[in-house]
Amino acid sequence: MDSRQSLLLTVRALTSVLDAADPFTRGRSLRISRYAVRIARELGVPEQEWADIELGALLHDLGRNAILHDVVQSPRPLDAGERAVVQTHPTIGYAMLKDIPGLEAASEIVWTHHERPDGAGYPRGIPADQIHVGARIVMVCAAYDAMTEDRPYRRGLSSRAACEELRRCTGEQFFPEVVNAFVQLHDSGRLWEAFSREELEIWVSRGDLAAA
């Protein structure tokens, strides 16, 4: 096993432990990483970049673990002050990862996965051409996963409704080519090709499982 594969296995294990601490995020990092690599393949991203995208997807919310538990796991919608605190998590995650050998590109994905093509994202509001391709992919995958999850204060959307919401926000919040690839893979059932049957039954919604 080479050092890159060892790093991936370590990060997968660590993020699964972090996700397990919250019943609403269990399996989330793995799902998003699987979606992200599948979309990268569909978009023709060079294979040598897939590992960085997987690592960035697995670690994209790492900074949330440095934020007060009561804010991150609030049973109600956040107020403006709490949202501002949560919006620091990409910068926190980037600072935690940027100097670790092998995670340089992943740290850039972590830092930019809430930026937007219209420049209205956070934490820096950078222009579209400065947003890492992995972050463009992760932002769509993370949004879909969040929209389809139940929360204490709301029911999750159906997979079809979540895809429609992605399309509605295309060009402003999400990059069109990524949304198009995601929806096409979703509708064909090919989005779940990298999941085992056990993972599908545990972590993927029933509506999606039927499509798969």
Image (cartoon, grey):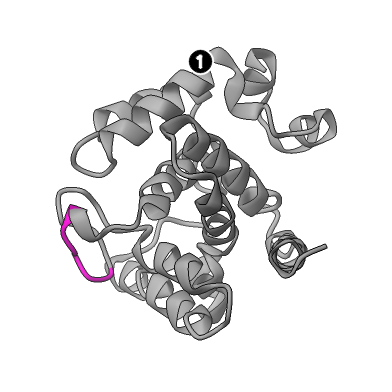
Other residues around mark 1 within 10 Å, as few (<14) / some (14–19) / many (≥20): some
Q: Is residue 149 visible?
A: no
In the rendered view, would you say 4 is above or below 95?
above
Q: How many marks?
A: 1
Mark 1 sits on what residue? 187
Name which residue lies at 16% across and 58% down. Answer: 127
Assign the magenta stretch its main secondary structure: loop
Secondary structure of the residue carrying tag 1 is helix
The amino acid beneath tag 1 is Asp
**Does the rendering let one see residue 169?**
yes
Is residue 197 highlighted in magenta? no
Quadrant for the N terminus, please.
Answer: bottom right
Q: Using the image as rendered, state which of residue 142 and residue 94 is in the foreground.
A: 94
Give the left or right position of residue 69, taking residue 84 as reference: right
Return the residue nearer the eye: 49 or 90: 49
Give the quadrant of residue 123. Answer: bottom left
Locate residue 92, reporting x and y percent. 44, 80
Q: Residue at 68% of width from left, 14% of height from top?
A: 210
At x 51%, y 71%, the residue is 64
**Measured from the top left, where is residue 131 in percent x and y?**
28, 57
Residue range corresponding to the magenta coloring: 123-128
Question: What's the residue at 84%, 33% (across, down)?
Answer: 198
Which image quarter: residue 212? top right
